[in-house]
Image: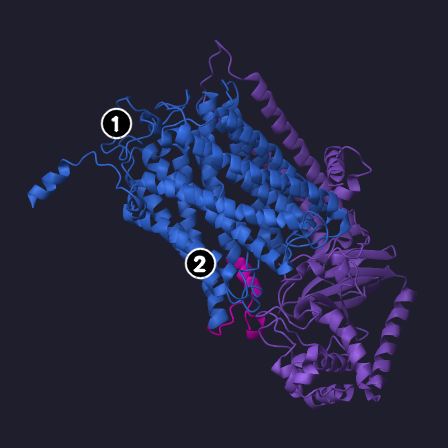
Chain colours: A blue, B purple
């Protein structure tokens, strides 16, 4: 017995397994992080292709390339894939790679759970995407799947959709349990909570949000399932049910969900801005409190998505005020980032460019968010392209730009190779111009009265829609360049140093690039000063 | 041609916000009544506050980017907080928000008002048309999109009112308080007329209220704003505000028509006559789902051509038309169409696409539909 244990002791520096089994059975946080990131990257192109179909259809008034039915399937699956298949898995990928390295832990706390939570995700999206090839077509009721359109009037594939959402939820919950357990139990000695890197903080709070709301989503889709197959009437007015109940339940999940998609972005951007300003982040404590208060507020603002359902005036006012409150911690964060840059020594490598664009364009998305919070004005904005412009500003130049920035920032650490700076900057400028070309005119068509989710539109919206489509095609193409830059770095990049960036601080930068397969097997000593968080 | 259009668009994009003539095309409509104008004013107030904040923040950012780029021999500062400053801007944000909340609250209270109207109209959303019922006058009709399939498929030219035109607009009198009671028959729709600043979800099982008061006669257009299925983009709203006298004429006209239709039901009908009317009704009401050739879009919208029910089960077909199909998109047409129209469209489907050859070929006359209705009563 003891001989076996002895044998393992000699096996300290074992690397990854060979071939496909490395990826299938891996319990290594770095491998799983890479799997999540590649999965998200692939889904970005699938969801992006759907966006291209949407913009091609809307290029000019009149029917263009797809039927209204297929258009609705595109709108629905574009939303579902981008939310659940791109942004969320990308952030989980970052968490896997970075949380253990930033807190000085050898791996995630629950490595086998980690493997499972990743591998059920491709299964979920396999189920979802397979509905395109089934009788009745893919889900066509919007990513918000309001009942009864998604129950009594849904295509038969809705059951597959419900199953897929359940699996995605299970994956997220397992991932969150893992993140929380890791952060609370595996920090290196001396790393108190208020010394944790901001990315770790944002993920700790995000993970709590996920655990709180994913079961609510699961409840919503389970009620749908019961209504569709087992004769209940949760959302069926004819049976004494309440279609508005669905929206309350959905948005009780849905609003925290939008912060799940932005909080880790705040963490990533904070690290990048401090590195390239060569100055510590301004107001670390207020950053932490701001993130926590955004998370808490996210539970009491959900019905601002529902100002037009016929709530009593007290409800309208309550949700208007609570929503406006969110502007305070968000404003604090923006000002903190600017103050970090203030009197710094700024350089503008690709990650910094994307991070600065994040702050600027997220601010625009935040300001349109304040406009949308004003309930009486929302009666004019609701369900128009103004809303589409708003949430794409916070999700594309918001969440997605932070992910791209994070990839450029940590890619040399992960792979050991530098990306091509010139190509990176080209990618940035193309993305920056085209993202604004795509989403800025949407504000105008929305205010002028174009409803969202329509496959064809009235003549007065024609000019701006054409601009939007051109911008969207350009943005889509630019992301192919991103893929090229990443692959080029991996295969032909110059060797990166451990430090990579002159101003980078944090435990992950004390490691080699790429880091060994297992790192921090003995925790770093933060007090001794040899490794400073 | 596209290139030319594109250059024009790009120029417009950058110049439009500057030139006030183009302002209207890219901004919210000021609306045609007091409450809409007040909401517009609120929108502009909040908008300019946001523009000022945005300009200051982005301007400051540009300043930072230029001023603090890395220079030889200049060391970065190393401060990392300033509690007083942080508290100051937190309070500043709160004050700005309070400044926004005060006018917003007052407008909200004015917009929310469910007092009875001089005229009360029940609006029901159906997949994919609106039904208007004048509660005091017992007049009811459906409002369908009239834009032709050819225009939608780019075969015929598109007009100014492309996708915003209907066969029967909602007619309301000016200078009267009109209250809308809004509900839906199948899925959730949303009734929006930007000029009135009225957007209210139409939800099955609920009756929401909204109201308007229009000063100027005119035609006001809007659209459904809640995804309600395949043809969500094809159920516009057209409201005609007319003088009180014209309004009375309109109501009287509707009542006369109802009386005439009752007479028609008793008339003796030729098959060809019914077939011709039926074809018209079919093209207007049925093609969206069942298609011109009767093939439908299975499995969601079943085919009529070659259907066992359409060919051989007249009784069941009448029942489907009158009651709709539970849990499917097929709705009841008992209220939407007259007895003549229902009989005609059934006759049409039983004769068209070779159905008469394959089935019993029996026709349905308006009297049978009337009998069906009466038996139910």
CB atoms of marks 2 and 1 within 8 Å: no
Q: Does residue A283 show up? A: no
Q: In what element is the residue under mark 1?
A: loop
The C terminus of chain A: image quadrant: top left
Q: In what element is the residue under mark 2?
A: helix
What is the count of numbered marks?
A: 2
Q: Position of residue A18 (x, y in %)?
A: 27, 41
Q: Which of the pair B331/B96 is nearer the observer?
A: B331
Q: Does residue B144 show up? A: yes
Q: Is residue B351 magenta?
A: no
Q: Is A515 above or below relative to B373?
A: above
Q: Is B165 above or below relative to A86?
A: below
Image quarter of residue A359: top right
Q: Position of residue A360 (x, y in %)?
A: 58, 32
Identify the mark at residue A525; answer none if there is no mark. Answer: 1
Q: Position of residue A171 (x, y in %)?
A: 38, 52
Q: Is A233 above or below relative to A56?
A: below
For residue A403, side relative to residue A521 (left or right): right
Tag 2 subunit? A
- Whole-angstrom CA distance, mark 2 to mark 1, is 46 Å
For residue A2, side relative to residue B361 (left or right): left
Q: Position of residue B88 (x, y in %)?
A: 55, 29
Compare marks 2 and 1 and give the one earlier in the sequence.
Answer: 2
Write the residue at 63% across / 83% down. B309
Disc 1 residue crowd, few under 14, some 14–19, many 20+, Cα 10 Å: some
Residue of label 2: A127
Tag 1 subunit? A
Write the residue at 51% across / 23% down. A348
Query: Which portion, as a residue range, is magenta?
Result: A230-249
Q: Which of the pair B213/A454 is nearer the observer?
A: A454
């Amino acid at each position: 017995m003891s001989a076996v244990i002895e044998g393992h002791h000699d096996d300290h520096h074992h690397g990854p397994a060979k071939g496909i089994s490395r990826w299938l059975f891996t319990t290594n946080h770095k491998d799983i992080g890479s799997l999540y990131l590649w999965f998200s990257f692939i889904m970005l192109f699938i969801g992006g292709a759907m966006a291209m179909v949407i913009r091609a259809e809307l290029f000019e008034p009149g029917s263009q390339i797809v039927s209204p039915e297929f258009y609705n399937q595109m709108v629905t699956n574009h939303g579902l894939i981008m939310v659940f298949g791109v942004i969320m898995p990308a952030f989980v990928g970052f968490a896997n790679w970075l949380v253990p390295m930033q807190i000085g832990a050898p791996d995630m706390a629950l490595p086998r759970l980690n493997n499972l939570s990743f591998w059920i995700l491709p299964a979920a999206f396999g189920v979802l995407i397979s509905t395109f090839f089934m009788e009745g077509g893919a889900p066509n009721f919007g990513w918000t799947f309001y009942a009864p359109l998604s129950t009594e009037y849904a295509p038969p594939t809705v059951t597959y959709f419900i199953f897929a959402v359940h699996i995605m939820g299970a994956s997220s919950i397992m991932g969150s349990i893992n993140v929380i357990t890791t952060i609370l139990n595996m920090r290196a000695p001396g790393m108190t909570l208020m010394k944790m890197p901001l990315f770790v903080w944002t993920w700790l709070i995000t993970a709590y949000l996920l655990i709180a709301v994913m079961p609510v989503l699961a409840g919503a889709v389970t009620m749908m399932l019961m209504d569709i197959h087992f004769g209940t009437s949760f959302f069926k007015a004819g049976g004494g049910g309440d279609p508005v109940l669905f929206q309350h339940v959905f948005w009780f999940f849905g609003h925290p969900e939008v912060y799940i998609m932005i909080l880790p972005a705040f963490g990533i951007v904070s690290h990048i801005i401090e590195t390239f300003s060569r100055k510590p982040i301004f107001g670390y404590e207020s950053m932490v409190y701001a993130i926590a208060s955004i998370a808490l507020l996210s539970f009491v603002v959900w019905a601002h998505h529902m100002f037009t359902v016929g709530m009593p005036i007290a409800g309208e006012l309550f949700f208007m005020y609570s929503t406006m409150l969110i502007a305070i911690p968000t404003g604090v964060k923006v000002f903190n980032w600017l103050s970090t840059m203030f009197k710094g020594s700024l350089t503008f490598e690709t990650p910094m460019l994307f991070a600065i664009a994040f702050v600027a364009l997220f601010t625009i998305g935040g300001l349109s968010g304040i406009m949308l919070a004003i309930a009486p004005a929302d009666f004019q904005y609701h369900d128009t392209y103004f809303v589409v412009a708003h949430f794409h500003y916070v999700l594309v130049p918001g969440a997605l730009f932070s992910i791209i920035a994070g990839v450029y920032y940590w890619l040399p650490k992960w792979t050991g190779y530098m990306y091509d700076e010139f190509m990176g900057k080209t990618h940035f400028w193309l993305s920056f111009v085209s993202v604004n070309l795509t989403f800025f005119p949407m504000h105008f068509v929305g205010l002028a009265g174009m409803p969202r989710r329509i496959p064809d539109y009235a003549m007065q919206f024609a000019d701006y829609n054409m601009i939007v489509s051109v911008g969207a095609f350009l943005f889509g193409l630019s992301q192919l360049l991103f893929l090229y830059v990443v692959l080029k770095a991996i295969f032909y990049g110059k060797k990166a140093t451990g430090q990579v960036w002159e101003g980078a601080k944090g435990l992950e930068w004390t490691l080699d690039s790429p880091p060994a397969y297992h790192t921090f097997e003995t925790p770093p000593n933060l007090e001794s000063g040899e490794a400073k968080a | 041609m596209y290139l030319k259009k594109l250059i024009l668009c790009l120029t417009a994009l950058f110049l439009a916000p500057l030139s006030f003539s183009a302002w209207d095309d890219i901004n919210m409509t000021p609306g045609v009544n007091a409450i809409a104008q007040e909401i517009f004013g609120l929108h502009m107030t909040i908008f300019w506050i946001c523009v000022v904040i945005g300009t200051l923040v982005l301007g400051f950012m540009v300043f930072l980017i230029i001023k603090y780029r890395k220079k030889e021999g200049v060391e970065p500062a190393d401060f990392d907080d300033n509690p007083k400053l942080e508290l100051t801007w937190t309070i500043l944000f709160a004050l700005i928000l309070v400044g926004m909340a005060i006018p917003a609250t007052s407008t909200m209270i004015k917009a929310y008002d469910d007092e009875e109207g001089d005229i009360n109209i029940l609006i029901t959303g159906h997949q994919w048309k609106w039904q208007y019922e004048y509660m005091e006058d017992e007049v009811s009709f459906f409002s369908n999109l009239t834009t032709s399939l050819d225009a939608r498929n780019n075969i015929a030219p598109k007009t100014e009112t492309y996708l915003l035109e209907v066969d029967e607009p909602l007619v309301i009198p000016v200078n009267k308080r009109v209250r809308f009671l809004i509900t839906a028959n199948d899925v959730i729709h949303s009734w929006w007329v930007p000029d009135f600043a009225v957007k209210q979800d139409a939800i099955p099982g609920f009756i929401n209220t909204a109201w308007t008061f229009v000063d100027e006669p005119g035609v006001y257009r809007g659209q459904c704003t809640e995804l309600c299925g395949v043809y969500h983009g094809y159920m516009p709203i057209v409201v005609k505000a007319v003088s009180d006298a014209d309004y009375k004429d309109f109501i009287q006209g509707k009542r006369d028509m109802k009386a005439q239709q009752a007479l028609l039901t008793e008339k003796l009908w030729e098959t060809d006559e019914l077939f011709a009317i039926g074809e018209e009704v079919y093209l207007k009401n049925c093609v969206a789902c069942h298609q011109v050739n009767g093939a439908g879009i299975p499995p969601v919208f079943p085919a009529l051509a070659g259907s066992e029910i359409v060919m051989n089960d007249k009784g069941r077909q009448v029942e489907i038309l009158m009651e709709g199909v539970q849990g499917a998109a097929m709705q009841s047409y008992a209220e939407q169409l007259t007895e003549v129209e229902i009989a005609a469209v059934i006759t049409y489907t039983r004769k068209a696409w070779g159905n008469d050859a394959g089935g019993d070929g029996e026709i349905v006359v308006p009297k049978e539909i009337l009998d069906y209705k009466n038996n139910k009563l």
